[in-house]
């Protein structure tokens, strides 16, 4: 999942309390993830789903992912190619869901300093976000080792599969 | 307690027991054995089945699984019907005996059918799973992939949370409810108490019936908390005894130690609380009804796990008895369980609601999360006894949803605008 240093990705900045109804609206929940992802974040930023590029980073304030336990909130971001979520604070079920699906979610007190549209590099191991010139823009709290392993395995199911095979 | 065991909160005690330890420290990550796993039709079988297949395993212990179809029931279209059909097949295939198909909302069914007990470590595939805390259970919400992991292994990792002690003292005034308390707490404590447990205590809580306690614990989700727990007491034991649930000694003595550590302690005075209304689009946007604009209403909705239990609808009936819903406003009622509907029908409460002009909807999660009947059109304004009013949740993204207690929703339906229920309660 690490985005190698030279790869520049865009910051998509959102505010506080980006909730699960905004990430995966209830009225589309019957549908497949393709159908849900098209509407991801449209209530606050209609162009997002069509414009986001693989590896781009979604940045939020406090309470990112608050609300429902619906995993599609994280899955929609993955489906759209989002490489990581960095936020001042993350709701716990969203946090676990994202990690369990292989999407790195990192908490950073510097999230507020990251500006929309900035092209950056992101290193999952160190949790450092740098600009194109190599200046550090944000330091994220590192994931505990066993969560990093789940993310690297591509989520909890591949991780469990590996463990079950080991016996 | 032995002198070497550090003082523990009720949550620490439950986690320690589930982890096979004598005590746990805040921040420690431990693996817990799951006593009960609840899932529903939306986040359950249709999301976990493929993952179990991928792992090549079955369910670790089907007797510990409770499956409830509530989000898509009754089916409103072919897609919903397909989800319900898949859920039934899953229940049959995995021999899940605790399967409740269209008889109520999961957070109401669990206690109604005697599945909630003090001291159990439980997970639910729904964010309002903290409801179980009303019975002194440690119950947290999880997503579908995590549920697949629990179903496969019977275990889950947990970071031992800090606890915030929230004490309410004194008697609530007439027309005041657990919903008002929780909306007040959302406004006061905010919605980002991430990873923390809220422990509710005090004479106000002790005086509450179980259904009101369920609303307290349920809406801990709106506080962003990991769960919300209430120590079991005589009210809890009487409720369980009536359902034939036998408890062990340790379950009856379960309490936080007097010198347990809390991240924060808050004390609130229930006697001065006014009815609360949460304006769009957040439960934290709550104010006293007296400080809320008298907005005209297209719809009043009594539904969901925090707003259409037996006592919730009795509250509404107190207001609606002998009165009519205002012209231009529609009142929809979706009882939280079929048992609730039956009880209200038996004693005439249902007739009071219907004579007032309410429209009776099927039991289920309904419009609360935008899944079922009663969703809103562009620009419509609604007041609802549900738990959450995020943008776009109850239908159109331009609809405006206010949250309030069943009393306030009923009073507002009569007036056709947001109203103070105390005007109707002499």
Image (spheres, grey):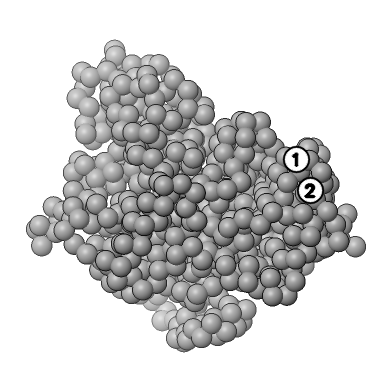
Mark 1 surroundings: few (<14), some (14-19) or many (≥20) residues within 10 A: many
Q: Nearer the viewer, residue B117 or B265?
A: B117
Q: Position of residue A102 (x, y in %)?
A: 26, 41
- Asked if A118 appears above or below B373 in the picture, the reply is above
Q: Position of residue B75 (x, y in %)?
A: 47, 53
Q: Nearer the viewer, residue A155 or B51?
A: B51
Task: Kindly identify which chain the residue marked by label 1 belongs to.
Answer: B
Q: What residue occupies the far right of the structure in this picture?
A: B426
Answer whether residue A21 is visible to the viewer in this image.
Answer: yes
| Labels 1 and 2: the sequence-earlier one | 1
Task: Kindly identify which chain the residue marked by label 2 belongs to.
Answer: B
Answer whether residue B257 is visible to the viewer in this image.
Answer: no
Q: Nearer the viewer, residue A67 or B355?
A: B355
Q: Position of residue B3 (x, y in %)?
A: 42, 79
Q: Which residue is mark 2?
A: B412
Q: Residue at x 44, y 38 (%)?
A: A28
Q: Secondary structure at mark 1?
A: loop
- The quarter of the picture where the C terminus of chain B appears is bottom right
Q: What residue occupies the far front of the structure in this picture?
A: B78
- Asked if B389 appears above or below B48 in the picture, the reply is above
In the picture, the disc for residue A159 is none
Q: Which residue is mark 1?
A: B297
Tell me if B253 is positioned left or right of B29 in this view: right
Q: Quadrant of residue B97?
A: bottom left
- Asked if B185 appears above or below A44 in the picture, the reply is below
């Amino acid at each position: 999942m690490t985005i190698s240093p030279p790869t520049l990705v865009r910051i998509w900045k959102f505010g506080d309390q980006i909730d699960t109804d905004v990430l995966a609206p209830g009225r589309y929940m019957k549908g497949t993830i393709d159908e849900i992802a098209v509407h991801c974040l449209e209530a606050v930023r209609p162009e997002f789903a069509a414009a986001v590029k693989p590896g781009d980073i979604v940045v939020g304030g406090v309470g990112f992912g608050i609300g429902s336990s619906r995993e599609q909130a994280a899955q929609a971001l993955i489906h759209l190619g989002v490489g990581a979520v960095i936020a001042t604070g993350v709701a716990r079920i969203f946090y676990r869901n994202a990690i369990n699906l292989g999407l790195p979610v990192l908490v950073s007190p510097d999230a507020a300093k990251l500006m929309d549209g900035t092209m950056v590099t992101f290193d999952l191991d160190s949790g450092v976000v740098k600009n194109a010139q190599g200046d550090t823009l944000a330091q994220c709290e590192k994931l505990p080792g066993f969560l990093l392993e789940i993310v690297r395995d591509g989520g909890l199911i591949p991780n469990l599969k590996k463990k079950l095979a080991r016996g | 307690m032995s002198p070497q065991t550090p003082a523990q909160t009720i949550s620490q005690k439950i986690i320690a027991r589930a982890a096979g330890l004598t005590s746990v420290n805040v921040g420690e990550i431990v693996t817990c054995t799951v006593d009960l796993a609840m899932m529903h039709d939306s986040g359950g079988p249709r999301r976990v089945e493929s993952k179990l297949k991928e792992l090549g395993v079955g369910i670790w212990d089907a007797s510990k699984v409770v499956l409830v179809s509530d989000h898509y029931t009754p089916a409103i279209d072919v897609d919903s019907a397909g989800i319900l059909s898949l859920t039934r097949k899953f229940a049959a295939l995995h021999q899940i005996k605790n399967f409740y198909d269209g008889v109520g909302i999961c957070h109401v069914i669990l206690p109604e059918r005697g599945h909630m007990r003090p001291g159990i470590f439980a997970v639910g595939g729904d964010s309002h799973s903290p409801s179980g805390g009303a019975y002194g259970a440690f119950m947290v919400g999880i997503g579908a992939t995590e549920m697949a992991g629990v179903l496969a292994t019977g275990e889950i990792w947990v970071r031992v949370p800090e606890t915030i002690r929230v004490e309410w003292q004194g008697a609530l005034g007439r027309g005041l409810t657990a919903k008002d308390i929780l909306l007040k707490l959302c406004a006061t404590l905010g919605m980002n108490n991430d990873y923390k447990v809220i422990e509710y205590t005090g004479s106000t809580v002790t005086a509450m019936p179980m259904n009101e306690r369920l609303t307290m614990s349920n809406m801990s989700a709106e506080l962003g908390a990991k769960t919300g727990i209430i120590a079991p007491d005589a009210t809890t034991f009487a409720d369980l005894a009536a359902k034939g649930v036998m408890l062990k000694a340790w379950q009856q003595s379960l309490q936080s130690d007097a010198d347990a550590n809390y991240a924060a302690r808050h004390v609130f005075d229930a006697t001065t609380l006014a009815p609360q209304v949460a304006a769009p689009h957040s439960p934290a946007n709550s104010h006293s009804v007296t400080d809320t604009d008298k907005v005209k209403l297209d719809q009043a909705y009594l539904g969901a796990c925090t707003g259409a239990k037996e006592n919730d609808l009795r509250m509404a009936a107190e207001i609606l008895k002998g009165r009519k819903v205002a012209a231009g406003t529609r009142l929809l009622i979706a009882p939280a369980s079929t048992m609730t509907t039956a009880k209200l029908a038996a004693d005439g409460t249902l007739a009071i609601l219907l004579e007032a002009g309410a429209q009776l909807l099927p039991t289920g999660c309904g419009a609360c999360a935008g899944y079922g009947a009663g969703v809103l059109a562009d620009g419509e304004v609604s007041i609802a006894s549900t738990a959450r009013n995020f943008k776009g949740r109850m239908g159109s993204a331009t609809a405006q949803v206010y949250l309030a207690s069943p009393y306030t929703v009923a009073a507002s339906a009569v007036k056709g605008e947001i109203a103070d229920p105390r005007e109707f309660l002499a």
